[in-house]
Each structure stands twice: as C-alpha cells, then as structure tokens.
Amino acid sequence: MVYDPNQALADALANIAYQSGNIRNRYTEGIDKWNMQRQALVPKMQSGFARRGVVNSGIKQKGFGDWARDTEAGQKQLRRNLDDALFNLVGQQLGAYNVYGQTQFDDALRRAQTAAGIREATQ
C-alpha cells in the first residue's frame, strides 16, 4: 500500500471533526444536565424555605445566591473543559497540516533534485 498524503490528511481532518462533534455534544449534555437540575431543584428549595417560614429572609437569598454561584462555577468549568479540548484539537489539526506540508515539500525537493540530475547529465 502506497502512502497517500492527501488521504492521510483527509483521514486526520475527518477524525478531528468527529472528535470535535463529540466534545461539543458532551458540553451541551453537561449544560442540559445543569438546566434540568435547576428546574428540579428550584421548586424544592422554594418549598423548603416556605416550610421553615424563611421565604422573605436573608437565609433564602443566601441559599439561592450560594446555589447560583456554584451553578455558574460548574458551567464555567464545563466551558473551560470545552475550550481546552478544542484547543488541543487545533493542535492536532496543525500537526496534520504540518505532516502534509512536509511530505509535499519533500516530494517537490526530490523531483527538483531528479530534474537537476537529468539536466546535468544531458549537458
């Protein structure tokens, strides 16, 4: 089997695109999970504060504030993970193009050296 740099590049880019899709899906699933937890938790928190008679108190506000802060921190961490993973894929993509470019350069250099050798032999 002959090494085809065009096919190798196409395979690498297809693999990177597949990985990117998976990474983005995991991020979306994570955000959806946070949102579903919020939808389930907020009514429970409201009723819990109401049962204790602290609906209009600073305790309720602090509870919701702490929960919102933790939720935001979790979502930021998901975003950082997404950014890191996508950054790593950019590195893989640059590497694939580098390998392709190097093989093309090596091939062009080999052809130029062959042409120079033929030119010298015919003169």
Image (cartoon, rainbow, N blue to C red):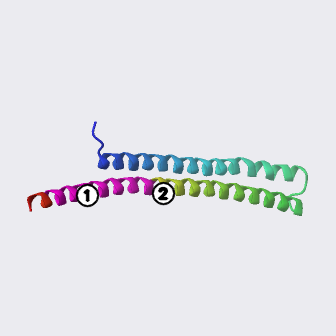
Give the Cα separation between the discs numbered 1 and 2. 27 Å
Q: Which residues are magenta?
A: 93-118
The crowding category of the residue bearing disc 1, from other C-alpha atoms within 10 Å (few below 14, some 14 to 19, many at least 20), is few
Residue visible at 12% across and 57% down in the picture: 121
Count the marks: 2
| Residue nearest the observer in this picture, 68 or 81 | 81
111, 5: nearer the viewer: 111
Residue type highlighted by circle 2: Val
Quarter the N terminus occupies: top left
Q: Is residue 32 above or below residue 87?
A: above
Q: Residue at x 61, y 54 (%)?
A: 81
Q: Are marks 1 and 2 in contact (CB under 8 Å)?
A: no
Q: Main secondary structure of the magenta part?
A: helix
Q: Nearer the viewer, residue 20 or 67?
A: 20
Residue located beneath label 2 in the image: 90
Disc 1, SS: helix
Is 90 on the left or on the right of 73, as rendered?
A: left
Examine the structure image and report whether residue 115 is included in the region drawn in magenta.
yes
Residue 57 shows in this picture: no
- Check disc 1 and report the residue beneath it: 108
84 relative to 48 in the view: left or right: left
- Tell which circle, 1 or 2, labels the residue nearer the N-terminal end: 2
